[in-house]
Structure formats: structure tokens, C-alpha cells
Image (cartoon, coloured by chain):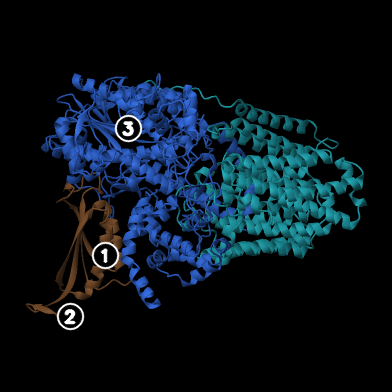
Chain colours: A blue, B brown, C cyan
Amino acid sequence: MNMHADIALAERMPTRTEVAGLVGLASRTVAPLWPLESAIAVNPLAGFEDMPFARAVQIAAQRFGARRSLPLPLWRAVLRTGRIEERALRDAAIRHLGGSLAAAAHIAPGVTALDLLLARMVQIAPENAPEQVGALPPDAAFIAKWCGAFFDHGAAATPMPHRELGLYRAVLALAGHDPEYRALAGKAGRDLLLQVPRDPLEAIAEGLVEIAGEADELEVLSSLVARLPGWAGHIRWRCEHADAELVAGAPATMADLLALWMLLARAGALCEGHGAAPLRENVADCLAGHFGLELDALARGALARLQAVANIEEDALGAIFMAAAEWTYANDLVPRLQGASRLGRQGVQPDAQLVFCIDVRSEPFRRALEAQGKFETLGYAGFFGLPIALHPFGGTRRSRLLPVLLSPQHDVAETVVEGREAEAGQLAEIQQRNAAGAQIFTAAKLSAGMAFATAEATGPVAALAMMGRTLAPRLATRAQSVLRKRREQAFTPALHGPGRHCGFSLEEKVGYALALFRLTGLGQDTARLVVLAGHGGSAVNNPYAAALDCGACGGHGGGHNARLLAAMLNDPAVREALAEHDVAIPQSTLFLAAEHDTTTDEVRIFDRDLVPESHREDLARLDAGLARAGQQNRVRRAGLLGRSPGELLAGAGDWSEVRPEWGLAGNAGFIVGPRWLSQDIDLDGRAFLHSYDWRADADGTALTTILTAPMVVAQWINCQYLFSTIDNQRYGSGDKVTQNLIGRIGVVQGNGGDLKVGLPRQSLFKDDGTPFHVPQRLLAIVHAPTDRVARVVEANDILGRLFGNGWVQLVVIDPETGRASRWREGEAVPGEGRDQHSLTC
Amino acid sequence: MSDTKVADIPLYPLRKIEIVVLAEDHLLVQDLLKAAGVGGWTMIRDVAGMGHHGFHQGKTIFNDQSGLVMFLGVGEGKVIADVARGLSRLFESRPGVTFLSDVQVMRSDYFAKANA
Amino acid sequence: MQAVKTIYPVSRLADLVPVLLWAGLAVLLAAAIAFSGPGSPITGLQVMICALTLFVGAIVASFSRRYMRADSRQAPFFATLAALLASVLAVVLAGNLPVLAIAWLASGLLLARLVGHADGWAEAQASARRIRRTFLLGDGALLLALALLGLNAQSTDITRVLAAVPALHALEVTVIALLMLVAAAARCALPPFSGWLLSSMTAPTPVSALMHAGLVNAGGFLLLRFAPVLEAAPLARYAALAIGLLAALWGLAIMAVRPDIKRSLAGSTVSQMGFMIMSCGLGAYTAALWHIVAHGLFKAWLFLGAGSALGMRDGRDTLMAGSRTVGLVAALCLLAGSYLAFGTGMNGELLPLMLAIATAAATLVMAVARASALKARLVLLAAVAALLGFHVLGYALVDILQPGEAAPLLPPFAILLLLACFLASWWWQALRMERGNSLPPALYVRLLNAGALAPATVGESR
């Protein structure tokens, strides 16, 4: 009877709470997407890290309609550059076939299964799938359009009406007037607008009952979230990471987005998902033809084996290439590190020690610097362990200068340096004046009375500006750097805050200072000068400028953190307390702070005036070393970019430059160990380096800290680069030349659509279209006793997940035995069935 | 609803729910509690524990997302049952434990269902 | 592992084209100076527009040298760019009708190709198709108009054609003028033809910059070149006025509503082009030409610098001048305008002039209000004064080069009414922004959707 059916229906409807739980789980499908002004690298497949890597890539490809691997022609281009060795490729192919025995299986005289597979990978022409990027389906385009209008953060002078109601209810209020909605949903849609519940959770509940049917509810919701990964990611950022007052005017949760999808689904407006790529037909014939064989003439077993090789999907071939790339890298690096480990440290008392960020761009500079004199360099997290948020002078919003895994514990205000009040006042005035000018200009552009005269009056000035910026970009670079230097001299982050900004207590300062020594293994007999160098990039007219800055500092430059820690370490009270903790720093040691500009390779040392007479000579020597190292590194990097070093410098201020530097492209390794281990090896700017002394860390807490934070951040970076390279349209943000900044928070491609995640094409591929970044997984190499590493991994869920599922490869070089072991990826749940076996070394 | 008196203080019976989850899942549980209408809850951070997947340390110093957290919430039976139902779905894919118990509180109005 | 060193040869065209363009600009300026004075083979109008095109083209080409470095089809890009600029120059410098027509058609097709430059992108191809469709209509109207003119004058030489205009029957000349207006409106992206410009964001940024700066004003050039036709048909002038006014306000509304920077700038272009066509209709040719040149430079600069529109802003940051200020300035302008209109007989130029004065006044007030320190105020005031100076100089220069004006179209009170229209809209904007009112939902949705491409069929979104 109908009544029973209705009761059954009502019983099956999930409660609000259940729906909230489902929505929360479904939103894990996408990773949070930070606004471009503080761009953070995240793994686009962060929601799939519970699964083994290969399976995660497969499922994510289905969900997002993305590729599973780099196309074959591009892999072949990588092979030609030498990043993949033939030998490693053979080994990877053998492993795929199932071992040497299976690989040597006979097909025809002189032709084995291995030959077939290698031919497919390297020689046979791949299927000519044209790179057609389809338009966004109308249902996604509709929701994307409204998301763009809703999440606008100051771009449009007239914001969307009813934003304070929340995303779902605001769109409900406006959809009735929208002809696109009428076209999508028809009359049914219009009726639905009136009937549908105003609470998003209830709307989802009703929708699930109606459309889910037999399918798993979580599956349905997850696939809907995955339709617009960019906007969904932005919503996750708003809910989980944004400062509350920033987003208070326009509240939105994932439930709002899903409720909108449910509305379209119930109106019957959902479009079909992504189709599967067709499998190529005649591979077997091609293979046979290549070796001059007749398919009919083969024996049955041989034919079956040939068919098996022919049926391997191109994505699987790509996976073989990736494994080969990883093995090439590991086989080159690990034995050299082992060799260095056996030799041990050759101690020389350095003139100066410099602590850089673990970023891969630090490594070439460090190598160049170490060649200039008696300089020792170390690697530490770029935020120097200080979980701070900075309130800039004269600004309203705070910037978070710490990894996104942490929340700020201290609010630091930017104050005026003593003795520079006049300069500071001037700069503040200039800033305010420029801001006022910009506001007036923006208002004038869209007032009915002023727009036309403004265009006419500004025209000639615009002509001059364009000529200047296009024909003389170095002037712009110089002006930029002068202004920046003045600002850095006049303002500094305050160690002791007045009023509402809490300062640091002595215990906290000692704690942060100690962390530097404990985590990096920096000895207490420090050199006369110790420089803490943060880093940042410089670019103009570039939406991805913040992606070149330090990720550990939340997408900002690391100079502020360095200055704070240096001030702490120079404090006599702190030094006294440190001595009680067995870290007795010599009186003659002076700590300095600096920022390494990774685009121009200049190192700016702060607070030079505060350097006492006694250390001026040391500072001069250091300056000379830094200048020479910068020059050397510029030449090297300019070669990689295909320019002259002069053009490289100009590029930092050139408004037409799409690629001022390669950034972290090419990243492949994460080495946890002392610097002397890797000092004589040219790591080619591909490795993150974190200093670690296994002897000073008996209980393993330093190792735990390093592996659970900096390494996780490095894994995110590696995964972002990896997936953005594999499928630049879906996991990356496409070509820069057609990007369209939206809402002042991100980019869309062309006329609109989904907010783009990931990196643009220009940051990953060379000008001729071949990949510069080789998509391979991060190789973490730890220089510590094997059982200590095993303990640390077992005790921390996240490590078991990352290593066990193959997201990061772990190699341990035991300093006591000299053996290298590789953590084997297990299919089992972490905690069961893990064991290790040695690499051939 | 019968009130029990212990030394002249009126006590009211309610249900308590304790939830231990990974720190990275704490927002999920918060959303659940909010959606069910629980008025307020206590969250204890840096919890360590022993479970099927081994021993979980407390949080590490550079990562707030590792380690465990524990939620304590009190409310009416129906509300808490609602939360438990939502959690059961969560625990199908995420590790965690939850305990429900009867409890007596001193100010029942304090724990009344939040205005939806 | 040794460092990977490769040479990346920038396409040779990419090096050649900018040099050619800069050289061309120099040659043009030299020739203009050498051949100046009456009896010169090219008019001031042609010199100005050629100079603008070459300048913006040279800047865009130099910009593209680096910007398009990773493009897979660099040589075709630069070749098409060069061809497009050549066709625009041909349109401007053409002495006879067939050359004009062919160059006009060519420029439309080349533009569509550049907009659809991105290989294998369905949306880009859709944008290009839309451009071709819209231009088909406009270009058809133009061809018809030119054919009629040529038939009437029995010649293809433009000077002779223009001289023969008075001989045309009133109805004929009105039809021709309206056809030309349609062609101009299509090229200038005035409503109802604005769709193609508002959905052309698939073009690479430099192409958009060139388009908004140097190509959409082809419509204005057409009306200025064939001014006698327009002057002989008052109906067409009224139509130009109406369509221009509508576009001016509609474009600004779109600009205020769009969250993405490129479409917002496109809305601004629609508005500015509308104002320019309106000036043409009113007969203020100097104002129109100066507007073409100055707006072109302005828009190119904004587009090329569109990558800096980052950084979340508080809505409060873009407050305009308070409604009281605006009201006061507006009232004073109306007063001054009435004096000028009735007293000195200024007609078509009154509108841009009064708006310029209003802008200067309002900007000064805002500068004084926003900046607190005296020095900052002085600097801002100096900046405003400098801009005003540039404006005046530019206008004077154009006036020298292009001395012609048409007979006034509207009586003085109508001109004042027009002025009041703009000032009233401005005041309404300020009032609304002060009160925090948003637009009525139906209007907002309409503006947000303006120019959207028709929903695509479900593509194999790979």
C-alpha cells in the first residue's frame, strides 16, 4: 500500500546528523585549495592517500576524469634527456612482466616478451589521441558561475545579493531569475525551487532519498564533490583554514555546494560524467609488424604472451616509466650517499654557518657557497620552528607565516626599528598614499560620471608605463628591490609586543632556540657568524608569484621568521638558559637573519647596522662569498631556463615573464642527514635537505618531528608537481596565457568554469613542450639506525600510510653498518606485514 | 524525568558521549555535533592511545594534524543517539572509538539542545 | 648527474615582428611630420589611428616575445598578429572602397583566428565561431553600404564617394548610414552585438589587449571616415546616440558585477566604445578620436597587467565618493554646463568636457579625503593635475590634427539632459554603494549572464 511505501521512504531518509557526517567524508575527496596570494602546494589526491598509490591514481582518474600517467611521447622525451637510464627501464619492464623468467619467455627466435614490452614503450607509435579539452558540462558550468559570483572577494564592485544567507540559499533566491537554470531544469526545476528545503543538510537528505537509489550514498556525494574540485577545494579552505572574520560576510560549507548539486539532480539536469578513453585496436598487429612476425605463424603460447603485452594499457606503460625514473634516481644517489657515509665527516671549523630552508632551490646555492670558502650550511624548516602570524604595519589582515599543518600560536606585530622612525613614517605615508590612489582609481573606473574621463586622462600615462615596463624591465626590478630594502630596514617583527599582541615568554624562546639545535644537530660550538636564511621569490604581474615563496611560511617569504629567531638567539638571557640545557653557545657567535631571493639569487642580510665592529670583517667575507655564489648559481639556472644571466635578473621585474624561475620543478628526493653526507654530490637542485645528526637524537623525537612535518610538506609539493605534470588540464591549471583571474582568489581558464587547482603548464614544461619536471614519487633517504626509523614509522600513523602505500619511498642508510634498506610497500594495513630487505649496494 | 538530589544539589540525568578520533578528523566530528544540535562540547588535544593500529603518540611539535583528540559532549538521549548514528557511518572508514553513558549534570538548561 | 643544458630558440618571427612594428611606428611618425600641412596624402585621423595601432601592436608583440614563449605554435601566432595589424593599417589607410572592404573582412577573420588560437580547446573554437557569426552580420551590412555608396558615386575612390554623398536621396543616405552604424556597432561590440567581446576570454592575454585597444575601435574609425554620410542622415545620428548611451551605461553595469578581471574589463570596453559612438553621433569628432586613442592605451595597459589582480580585498576598500560629494559636483557641473550650452553654444564637446571637469573635481575631493598627511595630499593633487594636463594636451593635439566637427544634432537642453543622465547615474551608484544596497536580483542575474556562450553540448571532457 502507498502508506507503507511512504513510511518506508520516511524511515530511509537520513537525519541531518548522518548527512553531516556523509558530507564531511565526501568533502575529503578534494584537497583544500588556498587562494593564490598565499599559494600552498597540496596533493590533489590527498583524499586518496589511504589507498596504495597505483590504485589511488586509478580511482582518482575515474572520479576526476583525469589521466593516469604522462603520455608516452612525453615519457620518451624524458628518456632522451637522460633522467631515465636504459638499464632501469629494462629492470622496471622486467618487474612488470613478473620477473626475469617471465620476461625471457620466448615469442619468436630472438624475440622475448621483454623485447616486445620495450618496443611498445620506446618505439611503437602511441595512439594518436588528440588533446581535445571539452567544455564544462552545463550543470557544472551553472554551479561554477554562481560560485564565482558568490566567492568573489573584492573584484566586483557590486557583490552578489543575499550573500549573507549562505551559498545555497543565495543561489536559490537568484536561480529563479536565471535563464540558464530554466534551460537546464525546465518547469520541474522552477517548482523545485519553491519546494526544496532551505536547510542544505535537509535538502541533501531529501535529494539522496530521491536519486541515490541502490548506490552508496557516500559514493554519490563524493562524485558530486569531484565534479568541481576547484570550488569545492576553495570551500574546504574557507571552512578549515581561513580566518573567520575574512569569510564572515559570505558563509559557505560543503553542504551548500552539495545541496545545489542535489537541486540540479532532482530537476534531472545532471549531465553524464566523463567517458572512458577507447582502447587501441591494432596494437598486436603493430607489434608483430615491428619485429617482422606473422601473427598466424606464432605458437599458441607465444601468441597469448604477445596479446598480453599488446593489451597493456598506455597508463601502465607510463607507470613503468615512472618506476624506471625513480630507480634511476635512487640507483645514482643512494650508493654515493652510502660511500660518503662510510668515509665519515671531515671536520673543519667553518668561518660562518648558514641555515637554509629545506627547499630544493637551496641546494645548488649551498653547494656554490661552500665552494667559496669555509662555509658550512644546514637545512631546517623554512619557518624556523616559529608558529607565528604577522600583523603588518599599517595593514588590517594578518599573514600566517607557518606550515598549514599548524595553527599560529603567537601574533607578532611589525614595528619600527629603533632610530628609523623618520624613514618608517615616510614609507607608511607612501604606502597609504599609494593605497588611496589605487582606491580612487578603482572607483573612478566604474563611476558613470568618471569612467570616460579617467580613461582619457590615464591613456598617455599608460602608454609611458607600457613602454617602460616592456622595453626596460630592469628599471622595474631595481625600483622594486630598492623599495623592498628600505622597507626591511625600517620595519621589523617585534619580539616583545605591547597590548593585545602577545610576545614570547623566556621558556618559549628557549624552546624554539633549542629546537633549532636538536632538529638539525647543530653543535654548540658554533662559528663566529650563524646566518638564518629564509627564502622567497620575486615576480611581477604573475598570479603564481606566491607559489615561488616559502611553502613552510604559508606562501610568504621567510625573512620575518629568520629575524625573530636570530633576535631570540642573540638574547643573553636565552643564551644563559640554553647553556643550562647543555647548549653553550660561545660568546663570540653572532646570529644574523637573511632572506635568499630564489629568483635573483641574492641573499639580503637584515639588520646590518646592528652588527658590532668585531664581526664586520667576517660579515664582509661572507658577503663576498654570497655574491660569488649567487653569480655562479645564476649562470647555472639561466642555462636551465635557456637565457642569459642578465635576462634572468630582468625577468624578476618583467611583467611579461611567465617563468621567472623553475621553482621546485624537478624535485625528487628528501635527504635527512648531515650535510657532509651529500656535500660532494651534485644533487642538481632536485633534493630537499634537512640536517639531522643521528647521534644527538637518542630517543628519535627529532627524527619524528622531521618526518611528520617537513617531509609531509615535501610530499605534498612532490605530489602537486607530479599530478600537475601528468594531467595539466585537470590536476594543474593549464596554460598561463589564457588564465583569467577571478574574485582575486584564483584563476579560471577562459570565460569561466571551475577554479583551477595545481600549477600552470609553464612551470612544469619546457618551451618545446617536453616535461622539465619528471613525474616521480619522492624518495626519502634517512641517515639513521634502521631500528630507530622503524620505530618512528610504526609510532606515527601518517608515516605508515605514506610509506606503506607507496606515496613516498623510504630508504634508510644505517650509519653503523653502512647498509641501505628500502621500506617495502605493503598492501596490508599499516602495522602488519612490514619487513625490509636490502638493496643491492 | 526524575531528579535525584545529592546533598541538596539538584541533578538531572542526561546522556554523555565520548569520542576519540585522529586529530585530522576533528572537524568531521565537530560538524556532526553541530548538525545534531549539541549545545557545546569539550575537546581534549594531544591525546595518546593504544589501538588496533598500534600506539599513537601525542601530537608532534610541527604537526597539529597527527595524534589523537577526544571529544566530550552531553545532551538529551535523542540528540546523542543521533550523533552516534552519524558517527557509525564515520567509523566505517576512519579509525576511532566512541562511548555512550548515562550521566548526571548540575545545570540541565546549560546542556539544552542548541537553537537550530 | 650533469645539469641539463638546452638551447630554446625563440621563434625567429617572435624576434622579427616587434622590431618591424617599432620601425613601422617610427617611419609613420616621421612621414606624418614630413608630410604635414594641407594637401598631405593622409589625414590626421589616419595618422592617429595608425600610430595607435602600431604602438599597441609593437607593445603587444614585444610582450608576447616572452609571454608566449611556451606556446606550441609561436610562428603562426606572430604571423597572424602581423597580418592582423597589416589589415588594420590597410583599413585605415585605404584610399578606395574595395581595399577597405577586403581589409575589413580580413581583419575580422584574423581576429577570430587569434581568439581561437589555443589548440584543441572546444571553448576557444566556440568563441571564434561566435566572432565570425557576429562579424558576418556586421560585415554584410558594411559591404552593402559601401556598394550602395560606390554605385551612387560611380567610383571606388573614397574621396569621390564622399563628395558625391549630397547627391543621394534622403532615404538612401539614411539606409546607408544605418547599415554603417550596424557595421560599426558589431565591430565595437555594442549591444546587441556585445556577446562576442564578452565571451572572448579564451584569447591569450596579449591578443585581448590588442583587441580591446586597437581593433574594437574600427567601428569608430568607420563612422569618422565616412562622417559626411552620417551627417546627411540625422536619423542615423539619433540612433548612434541612443545605442551609444545604452552601451555606455550597460557596459559599466556589467563591469561592476563580474568577478573575473578579463570580463570585467570587457564590460568596461563596451561602455567606453558606447560613449565614443555617442560622441560620433553628436558630431564631436575630436572628442571621439581622442577617446579612441586614449582609451586604447588605457585598456591595453590594464589588460597586459591583469595578472596583478590578486589579494583578497574588503568590500569597503572600493568605496566611491560619498553621495553628497557626487551630488554637489553633479549640480555644479550641470550649472556650468547650462552656461556653456546656452551661452557659448558648445554642443557635442560639452559632454566630454563637463565629465572631465566633474572627474577632476571629484578626484580632488576624494584625494583630500582619503589621504591624511599633507604631503600625500599634495602628491595626489599633483598627480590629478598632471593627468588633467595630459588630457588637455592630448585633446588639443587631436584638435589640431582633426579639425572637422559636424553640425550640432541636439538642441542645448537635450545636451544638458544627456549630461544629466550620466551625472544622475553616477549619483545613483554612489547612493546605492553608500546604503549597501545591492542590485535587484533579476537585473543582477541579467548582467552576470551577459555575453555567456550558449551552453555546450556534453563534450568528451577528457
Q: Which mark is nearer the camera, 1 or 3?
A: 1
Q: Earlier in the sequence, mark 2 or mark 1?
A: 2
The crowd level at tag 2 (other Cα within 10 Å; few <14, some 14-19, many 20+) is: few
> Would you say C180 lies left or right of A527 here?
right
Label 2 secondary element: loop
**Amino acid under disc 2:** Met
**Amino acid under disc 3:** Arg
The crowd level at tag 1 (other Cα within 10 Å; few <14, some 14-19, many 20+) is: some
The crowd level at tag 3 (other Cα within 10 Å; few <14, some 14-19, many 20+) is: some
Q: Are dots 2 and 1 in contact, CB under 8 Å?
A: no
Q: How many angstroms separate mark 2 from mark 1 (CA)?
A: 24 Å
The spot of residue B52 in percent (x, y) is 17, 50
Q: Is residue B88 depicted above or below A75 in this figure?
A: below
Label 3 secondary element: helix
> Would you say C328 lies left or right of A142 here?
right
Q: Which mark is nearer the camera, 3 or 2?
A: 2
Q: How many marks?
A: 3
The spot of residue A790 in percent (x, y) is 17, 36
Query: Which residue bears the numbered disc 2?
Result: B1
Residue B85: mark: 1
In the picture, the quarter occupied by the C terminus of chain B is bottom left
